[in-house]
Image: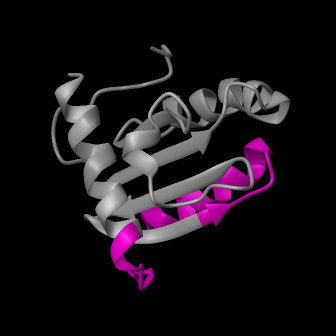
Amino acid sequence: MSQAIKSIVSNPSLWVACLCADWCGSCREYQARFEQVGASFPGAEFVWIDIEDQADLVDPIEVDNFPTLLVLANQQVRFFGSITPQTETLQRLVQAQMDSSTTKVEANVEIAAMALRIQAWSRAKA
């Protein structure tokens, strides 16, 4: 299991999951940046998900572009989609979600269910 996976010990107000694949060169390069940004937001939980190793968590969602992020704030989906693999992009996205006035995204049932599976899996690893 990747050392980038952090366990959720409580219900943090901000939760960020990166969905990537080990075979993807961009993902391998991005993982260190993802961890670096995660360390700069101590009140948030950052989780690295390999979509092939943890396919049962992601299915039936098709992840075609990397990195793809799932961001929850106060247990509500705030963002789900791919971003450019740049530190500054991730920092801006996370900082924007720290603002409680940001509105939630209307996530479909499958994305919401995936978020619950990933959170439960992360908690079980604690």
- Name which residue lies at 50% across and 29% down: 39
* Quadrant of res 84: bottom right
Q: Which quadrant, please, contains the C terminus?
A: top left
Q: Position of residue 48 (x, y in %)?
A: 51, 33
- Closest to the observer, 44 or 121: 121
Magenta span contains residue 3: no
- Closest to the observer, 91 or 60: 60
Judge whether 32 appears above or below 67 on screen.
above
Horizontal relation, residue 108 to residue 18: left or right = left
* Quadrant of res 28: top right
In magenta, the rendered stretch is 81-110
Q: Which quadrant, please, contains the N terminus?
A: top left
Q: How is the image coloured?
A: one colour
Q: How many marks are shown on the rendered structure?
A: 0
Judge whether 79 appears above or below 64 on screen.
below
Horizontal relation, residue 78 to residue 91: left or right = left
Horizontal relation, residue 69 to residue 75: left or right = right
- Closest to the observer, 117 or 105: 117
**Residue 69 seen anywhere in this rendered image of the structure:** yes
- Name which residue lies at 25% across and 64% down: 75
Q: Position of residue 44 (x, y in %)?
A: 38, 44
**Residue 8 seen anywhere in this rendered image of the structure:** no
* Quadrant of res 80: bottom right
Q: Position of residue 90 (x, y in %)?
A: 66, 51
Q: Position of residue 122 (x, y in %)?
A: 28, 34
- Name which residue lies at 79% across and 26% down: 29
Horizontal relation, residue 83 to residue 62: left or right = right
